[in-house]
């Protein structure tokens, strides 16, 4: 929105707080000013878009079991539009709580009351919260007044170029996409994915006849197995992370890991022929050892021919992460498999997916060609 124009139309100087000044106006003048704000907000709703990196950030926060609230000086109607028109279709959860200027008894930020409200709802102390925003005066000041940590999103580069002060923000990032790495570097996160060093587990071995045949590449031995048997994971063992994920590898995962193209093709044919397509996709997307899928295993090993078969399955999920939040594209990049990286990107893998440390796949490789390929994908720049 054009805030300069909004202030002018409301008759308020930019040096003052717009909502605070309107509250001081006579009733008639205040009503006119609020109509101006409502009109300009309505126009803003028509053009509202999610910031780049917002979807990946929300997924990353949810994977780390971190709750997310919203505090805005906009109206409750604008908040509901955000939830319905943008968050829902993107698979993002609703902000809870979501505090707008219409919430009775909660003054608009930078008054710290909203943070106290969130702190109470979540049963968390204010100094365990992180306020993220793009305004030093409204967002950073708001967070600091409440005793919370603060992060300034300097998307316009005004702070980095010295035009304005950060307001004392604890973190300054150029975009939402950079925020997860900054959070990882500065805070201790809860849960198993927040541990600096994850527990090491012993590697499993095939534990069923179908899995053993798949890993060894014995296509003929698998012809007698039904689709249900081929979708069945190995029993979990005490010496692996299967206890964490709840399941062992399926025959398809074993075949993909070993690069058994013929076996993978045969298993996929059986699964797809059994129908329905959704059931086949569920079996193909199953997570096994360390939470990795067949796509992850093929990507990690660089089996591009197997990847092409898997990528062609209707309903395939190319971005399912393992327990470290590493996606197949992270694996292919880290293991320096450029052809596998290209196969995944061409099939629609997300180049902005985040691992548990907030790294995108291009930040997880030491090969310049792979890094550039991922970073430039979809940008119009040479890949």
Image (cartoon, rainbow, N blue to C red):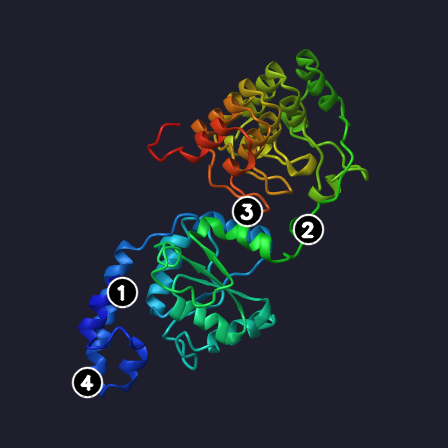
Label 1 or label 3, whichever lies nearer to me, is: 3
Q: Position of residue 204 (x, y in %)?
A: 76, 31
Between the residue at mark 2 and the residue at mark 4, the CA separation in whole angstroms equals: 57 Å
Query: Which sits in the foreground, 7 or 162?
Result: 162
| Residue annotated with mark 2 | 195
| Residue annotated with mark 3 | 358
Between the residue at mark 1 and the residue at mark 4, the CA separation in whole angstroms equals: 20 Å
Q: Do the residues labelled 3 and 2 touch (CB within 8 Å)?
A: no
Q: In which quarter of the image is the C terminus?
A: top left
Nearer-N-terminus badge (1/4) = 4
Q: Is residue 300 left or right of residue 202?
A: left
> What label sits on residue 307 in the rendered view?
none
Nearer-N-terminus badge (2/1) = 1
Between the residue at mark 3 and the residue at mark 4, the CA separation in whole angstroms equals: 50 Å
Q: Where is residue 126 in the image (x, y as percent from the top left)?
A: 57, 72
| Residue annotated with mark 1 | 41
Query: Which sits in the foreground, 85 or 374?
Result: 374
| Residue annotated with mark 4 | 28
Nearer-N-terminus badge (3/2) = 2
Mark 2 residue crowding within 10 angstroms, few (<14) / some (14–19) / many (20+)? few
Q: What element carries label 1?
A: helix
Q: Position of residue 60 (x, y in %)?
A: 54, 50
Image quadrant in which you'd find residue 242:
top right
Image quadrant in which you'd find residue 251:
top right
Between the residue at mark 3 and the residue at mark 2, the CA separation in whole angstroms equals: 13 Å
Image quadrant in which you'd find residue 257:
top right
């Amino acid at each position: 929105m054009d805030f300069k124009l909004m202030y002018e139309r409301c008759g308020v100087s930019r040096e003052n707080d717009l909502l605070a000044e309107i509250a001081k106006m006579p009733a008639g003048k205040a009503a006119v000013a609020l109509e101006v704000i409502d009109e300009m907000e309505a126009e803003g709703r028509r053009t509202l878009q999610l910031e780049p990196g917002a979807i990946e950030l929300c997924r990353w926060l949810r994977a780390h079991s971190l709750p997310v609230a919203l505090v805005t000086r906009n109206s409750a109607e604008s908040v509901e539009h955000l939830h319905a028109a943008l968050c829902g279709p993107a698979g993002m959860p609703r902000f809870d709580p979501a505090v707008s200027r219409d919430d009775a008894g909660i003054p608009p930020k930078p008054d710290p009351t909203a943070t106290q409200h969130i702190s109470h709802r979540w049963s968390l102390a204010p100094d365990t919260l992180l306020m993220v925003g793009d305004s030093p005066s409204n967002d950073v000041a708001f967070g600091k007044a409440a005793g919370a940590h603060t992060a300034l999103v300097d998307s316009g580069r005004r702070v980095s170029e010295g035009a304005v002060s950060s307001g004392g923000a604890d973190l300054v990032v150029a975009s939402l996409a950079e925020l997860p790495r900054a959070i990882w570097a500065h805070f201790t996160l809860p849960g198993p994915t927040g541990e600096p060093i994850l527990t090491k587990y012993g590697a499993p071995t095939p534990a069923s006849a179908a899995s053993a045949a798949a890993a060894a590449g014995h296509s003929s031995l698998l012809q007698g197995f039904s689709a249900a048997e081929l979708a069945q994971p190995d029993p979990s063992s005490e010496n692996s992370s299967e206890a964490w994920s709840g399941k062992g590898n399926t025959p398809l995962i074993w075949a993909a890991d070993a690069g058994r193209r013929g076996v993978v093709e045969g298993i996929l044919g059986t699964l797809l022929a059994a129908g329905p397509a959704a059931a086949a996709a569920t079996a193909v997307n199953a997570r096994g050892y360390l939470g990795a899928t067949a796509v992850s295993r093929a990507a990690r090993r660089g089996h591009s021919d197997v990847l092409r078969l898997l990528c062609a399955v209707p309903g395939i999920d190319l971005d399912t992460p393992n327990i470290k939040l590493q996606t197949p594209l992270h694996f292919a990049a880290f293991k320096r498999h450029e052809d596998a990286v290209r196969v995944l990107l061409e099939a629609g893998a997300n180049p902005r997916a985040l691992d548990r440390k907030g790294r995108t796949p291009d930040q997880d490789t030491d090969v310049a060609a792979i890094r550039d390929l991922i970073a430039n994908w979809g940008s119009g720049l040479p890949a």
